[in-house]
Amino acid sequence: MHREEGKFVAAILKPAIEERFDTTSAYRKSLAEAICLFFEQDPKSVRRDQTRREIFYYACSELLSKRNSERVLLYLPMWVLKDAPKDFRVVYKEAWYRLLHVQDVRENFHFGDCFELDARPSEGLERVVKCVHLTPWLLKYGYIDQQEILEILQYSLDRVLIQSFKDTWEYIQRRGILSKAKMLPLISETKFLPARRSVEPLYVSEKRQEWLDEFNKPAKLFTPEAKLEGPFFKNIPAFEAELEEIASRLKPSEIVMVGGSKLKGYGTKESDLDIWNLEELCASEDFYPGSFHAAHIYLNTIWLGGNKTNLEQTRRKIVDLYFNHPTTFAKRRAIERLESDLLQYRLLHKGFARFTGRFHYLIPKEMEGDCPFYNDEYRTIATMLYAKYVWL
């Protein structure tokens, strides 16, 4: 990267997940390219192109059919569901039923306001079965019917699942998706649940207050021409001087990882780069190399170090830990951490709105509808990111 007093500071300026996608994942790359190419074409003309449609829906079906990539279902644009071919509909519905057993932190799909650990209420964070919040569109486009929902509600003992269905009743009724007669049995099966209430932190720290103040503060984008769907390494020239400054302070044996909103394309003029020191991470109980909690740190960042050979060997060794995880559970949790980092924190929470200028949405608050999650432009970007970079 540069020389200072005879010391060479090395850098790997392409995030590891991008490098692996480009060099070692022919199968995933072919699926991702088919999906991205379809989205990059003129929407009206590409939907009439039967060959491109078939390739696109085949690629989506392949992701949906695999347990390690079925969560792409949560992000596919709603218009994709309409007039989709039968084979896609079957695979999509099978994936949806599998995801009925998966609970997520509700706030992850909203503003990401999850409080500090010691400020969380004793009952913990609210959970949601997020795929259930897609119910209005699945009904509208004929993927499921009222009777199927009723059977799920009658046989399930999962309060989180039932509550997630209840969240959608207002929207379904408002849009006239089901008749009043068909809604009554569904409402009856969920009436025992109390209304959702706002969860408040046990205390408001100075750090939290700063976050709240910053959340709604107008901000000027750092790279307004960036492509939020990647590749991320193309955003680096805009903040290369900051990387030089970080590198100049490194010791010969020191290695750091640098990431954040500027690398992902939706940073502001005031955004700081996120910096992690490898030695400190190795001593951490939660973010040591190989920990699924830390997958985003090692895979979605730029690496800087004092010795090029050591830097490359160290990164390769650590990255391989994630691609060669010995257990399905650990690999799946690591993949979900990549999903969270790339699609939710903070692209969904504030990055997309700041980048596009869209701050108002018309979905009920019970479904966390005052954020971009249901917006097809956000969902298109999220699907493209998922296809390219949420895998191991």
Image: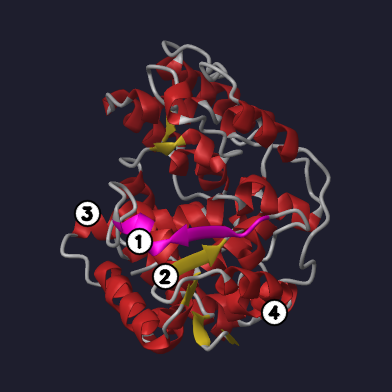
**Cα distance, mark 2 to mark 4?**
23 Å
Q: Earlier in the sequence, mark 2 or mark 1?
A: 2
Across and down, in percent, residue 50 comes to 58, 82
Most foreground residue, 346 or 363: 346
In the picture of the structure, the residue carrying the numbered disc 3 is 329
Residue 180's place in the image compared with 29, above or below, is: above
Q: Amino acid at mark 1?
A: Glu
The answer to whether the residues at label 3 and label 1 have Cβ atoms under 8 Å apart is no
In the picture of the structure, the residue carrying the numbered disc 4 is 237
Q: Which residues are magenta?
A: 272-282
Quadrant location, the C terminus:
bottom left
Q: Earlier in the sequence, mark 2 or mark 3?
A: 2
In the picture of the structure, the residue carrying the numbered disc 2 is 254
Q: Earlier in the sequence, mark 3 or mark 1?
A: 1
- Select label 3 or label 1 by which is in front: 1
Residue 200 visible somewhere in the drawing: yes
In the picture of the structure, the residue carrying the numbered disc 1 is 279
Q: Earlier in the sequence, mark 2 or mark 4?
A: 4
Left or right, 56 with respect to 328, comes to: right
Q: Earlier in the sequence, mark 1 or mark 4?
A: 4
- Select label 2 or label 3 by which is in front: 2
**Cα distance, mark 3 to mark 1?**
26 Å
Q: Amino acid at mark 3?
A: Phe
Identify the residue at image location x=40%, y=18%: 189
Across and down, in percent, residue 94 comes to 33, 54
Badge number at residue 255: none
Give the crowd class for mark 4: few <14, some 14-19, many >=20 residues within 10 Å: few
Q: Earlier in the sequence, mark 3 or mark 4?
A: 4
